[in-house]
């Protein structure tokens, strides 16, 4: 393992670093503390994760991932380097160093095995790299898919294939591998939040398990290691009875670390590399960290103690060439470590650098303002020229408008004369209309008189019709009498015809056999003689 190139001397004061400050600000996967310079060391640098970018400046937070490193600069912008600097995917490159466009400023950062996650200045969460899909195949388990309606968050940490946060209401949410209770590595139920968890003040994400400090100061863990049944389950989620409360926790791949309120350290879980064997005489500790196979402690004297893989014995790391250390973050299986330090001239130089940087920004801003004003003046000059041209055009248009107005005035006068003439015609038509109205009134009177005469004639006609009806009735009666007389006359004619026949017979001598007129015939003749026509 390559350690920082330093001289062995006193580490100096750790300044404002306290266990409480570390617990509240550093236990979430990223180191967020007073601004400092990033220092990185480790045994593997195949992807450039140990190479601090030139001109990075001071940073407020740093996080070491599996094969990459991320830091929040003092202005809130993010810098990421190591594996995954392009969108071309090939292990271990999963675009974890490709910062999304429009990300803005950040306040916390966490680095997983192949992904990066941040809390932005507005409290929302962004994540990218591996896990932008959820294929269920390594390494894409949805660890970079931020849940909808997650809301604002105050702490974040990243495991190998999962992400965990403390939300604004102090409850915990997690996503990625391990969303069900069916366990098969890497799905070890690390994203199944215990129903009795309640609210929390600090979180740490291990390989496949989570470690938290609850609001009452007690420690809880879930995911891999709830048993000691094998390598993945090495008991890292079984809280020792000696750890009743903690001010900071750190989760490694197969082990867990806790910083207790008295400044002592407790470790439990897998120990194949000696990572849970706390060194004797470690002293008072103010910050702890855990990589896949190592444990680290920032001691109150400013030194960092590390034990586990690659160390035959606990190793004490000094940073005299870069000054006092602020905090430490650890990477994954590749085993690299990042720290925020103050340079050897101390806080005064840091403040001076910050002042110079701020003044440089002010100067750059003023220069940009001057350039913008020059551009504005040039633009306004062009606008004035354009307006002058428009004024000339408007003057010409005004003259044309005046000529048009004169023509319209003449046309208006002609129309006024036509209106007068039409008014005279209208007056004459009004007089004619009045005469017609009088004539119509006279005609109406005559019509009324005729109507009255017609009514009288109608009444007279009705009387005549009644007389005619009476005469017709008399005529019908006369016709009836005539018919009766006619019938009587016909009967008498028959009688006459009979008498005539008798007379003729008498005249012809139609006598009886004895040649005499019979007494019957003579009697008949005498009886009907009066009926004969005279």
Image (tube, rainbow, N blue to C red):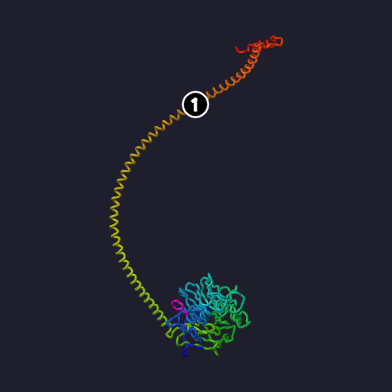
The image shows residue 3 at horizontal and vertical percentages of: 49, 88
The front one of 122 and 325 is 122
Does the segment drawn in magenta span residue 297? no
Range drawn in magenta: 73-80
Query: Magenta stretch: residue 78 in it?
Result: yes
Residue 435 in sight from this viewpoint: yes
Which of these two is toward me, 296 or 408? Answer: 408
Image quadrant assignment for residue 393: bottom left
Count of numbered circles in the view: 1
Outermost residue toward the right in this view:
514
**Callout 1 environment at 10 Å: few (<14), some (14 to 19), or many (20+)?**
few
Q: Quadrant of the C terminus?
A: top right
Q: Position of residue 181 (x, y in %)?
A: 61, 75
Q: Residue at x 37, y 76 (%)?
A: 364
Residue receiving disc 1: 461
Above or below, 193 relative to 318: above
Residue closer to the observer: 180 or 427 = 427
Residue 172 point in image, percent of width and height: 55, 74
Mark 1, secondary structure of its residue: helix
**Image position of 103 (left or right of 190):** left
Q: Is residue 95 above or below residue 475?
A: below
**Residue 193 found in image quarter:** bottom right
Q: Is 110 displayed left or right of 400 in the figure? A: right
């Amino acid at each position: 393992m390559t350690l920082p190139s330093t001289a062995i001397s006193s580490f100096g004061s750790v300044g404002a670093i306290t266990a409480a400050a570390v617990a509240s600000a550093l236990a979430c996967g990223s180191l967020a503390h007073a601004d400092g310079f990033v220092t990185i060391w480790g045994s593997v640098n195949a992807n450039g994760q140990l190479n601090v970018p030139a001109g990075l400046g001071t940073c407020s937070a740093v996080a070491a991932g599996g094969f990459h490193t991320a830091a929040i600069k003092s202005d809130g912008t993010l810098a990421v380097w190591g594996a995954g600097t392009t969108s071309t995917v090939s292990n271990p490159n999963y675009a974890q160093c490709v910062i999304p466009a429009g990300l803005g400023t950040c306040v916390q950062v966490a680095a997983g095995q192949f992904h990066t996650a941040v809390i932005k200045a507005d409290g929302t969460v962004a994540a990218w790299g591996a896990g932008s899909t959820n294929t269920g195949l390594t390494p894409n388990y949805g660890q970079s898919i931020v849940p909808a309606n997650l809301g604002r968050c105050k702490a974040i940490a990243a495991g190998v294939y999962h992400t965990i946060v403390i939300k604004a209401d102090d409850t915990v949410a997690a996503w990625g591998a391990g969303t069900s209770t069916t366990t098969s590595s890497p799905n070890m139920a690390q994203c199944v939040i215990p129903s009795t968890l309640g609210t929390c003040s600090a979180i740490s994400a291990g390989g496949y398990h989570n470690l938290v400090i609850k609001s009452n100061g007690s420690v809880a863990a879930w995911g891999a290691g709830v048993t000691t049944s094998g390598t993945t389950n090495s008991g890292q989620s079984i809280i020792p009875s000696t750890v009743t409360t903690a001010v900071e926790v750190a989760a490694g791949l197969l082990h867990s670390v806790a910083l207790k309120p008295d400044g002592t350290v407790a470790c439990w879980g897998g120990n194949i590399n000696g990572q849970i064997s706390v060194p004797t005489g470690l002293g008072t500790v103010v910050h702890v960290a855990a990589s896949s196979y190592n444990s680290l402690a920032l001691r109150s004297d400013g030194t960092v103690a590390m034990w586990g893989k690659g160390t035959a014995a606990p190793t004490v790391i000094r940073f005299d060439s870069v000054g006092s250390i602020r905090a430490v973050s650890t990477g994954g299986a590749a085993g690299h470590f990042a720290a925020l330090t103050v340079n050897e001239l101390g806080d005064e130089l840091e403040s001076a650098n910050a002042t110079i940087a701020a003044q440089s920004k002010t100067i750059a801003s003023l220069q940009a303002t001057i350039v913008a004003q020059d551009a504005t003046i040039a633009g306004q000059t062009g606008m004035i020229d354009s307006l002058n041209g428009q004024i000339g055009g408007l003057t010409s248009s005004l003259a044309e408008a005046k000529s048009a107005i004169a023509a319209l005035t003449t046309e208006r006068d002609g129309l006024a004369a036509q209106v007068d003439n039409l008014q005279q015609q209208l007056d004459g038509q009004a007089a004619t209309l009045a005469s017609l109205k009088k004539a119509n009134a006279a005609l109406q009177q005559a019509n009324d008189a005729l109507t009255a005469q017609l009514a009288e004639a109608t009444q007279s006609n009705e009387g005549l019709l009644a007389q005619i009806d009476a005469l017709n009735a008399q005529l019908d009666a006369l016709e009836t009498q005539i018919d009766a007389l006619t019938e009587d006359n016909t009967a008498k004619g028959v009688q006459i015809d009979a008498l005539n026949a008798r007379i003729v017979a008498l005249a012809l001598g139609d006598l009886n056999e004895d040649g005499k007129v019979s007494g019957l015939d003579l009697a008949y003749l005498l009886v009907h003689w009066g009926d004969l026509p005279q």
